[in-house]
Amino acid sequence: MKFDQFTIGQVYQTKSFQLTKENIMRFAGEFDPQYLHVDEEKANKGRFNGIIASGIHTLAISFKLWVEEGWYGDDVIAGTQMNNVKFTKPVYPGDELHLSVEVIDKKTTKSDSGIVTVLLSTFNDQEEKVFEGDLSVLIKR
């Protein structure tokens, strides 16, 4: 979709993605190797009673699910910023994540482009919010 096709207040839903212990540990092993993501024995004794996904992993899955819906398509030029990032609940193996995405702002930058800001709200299969953040992208008009 082009910039002019987005409307403030529009809400989109995404498909879901189920995490496994293996993909949590693989991602964390490469990008966030803290014990609570990679060491099951230590994690079982910790605050969350087991392995949890890295917040960065949750953010990456959220972005993946939104982009895969195809609303930006080839009209996206580049991401410009992410603000108000909040990890609100731990994400466990077996959790199935999905998003509600709301257009919260639009700004024209040039005659051929504008910035669209969406609020990404990620929920687990119990409908508990696990992540939210504002994402802005530069998109063709």
Image (tube, helix red, strand yellow):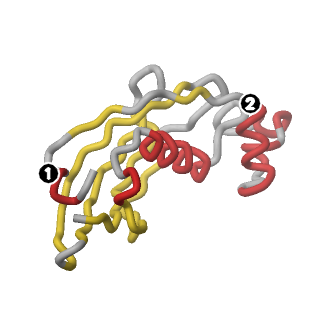
- Which residue is the site of mark 2? 21
**Residue drawn at (20%, 79%) of the image:** 110
Task: Residue 85 in the image: state x and y as whole percent.
Answer: 42, 57
**For residue 70, what is the image quadrant?**
top left
Decide: is 48 above or below 55: above
Q: Nearer the viewer, mark 2 or mark 1?
A: 1
The three-letter amino acid code for the residue at tag 2 is Lys
- Which residue is the site of mark 1? 8
| Residue 106 circle label | none
| Mark 2 or 1, nearer chain start | 1
Secondary structure beneath dot 1 equals loop
Decide: is 119 above or below 21: below
Task: Residue 53 in the image: state x and y as whole percent.
Answer: 64, 41
- Count how many numbered circles sit on residues in the image: 2
Task: Residue 90 in the image: state x and y as whole percent.
Answer: 55, 37
In the displayed structure image, the side of residue 93 where residue 137 appears, left or right: left
**Residue drawn at (42%, 66%) of the image:** 79
In the displayed structure image, the side of residue 20 where residue 128 appears, left or right: left
Q: Is residue 2 visible?
A: yes
**Residue drawn at (49%, 27%) of the image:** 16
The three-letter amino acid code for the residue at tag 1 is Ile
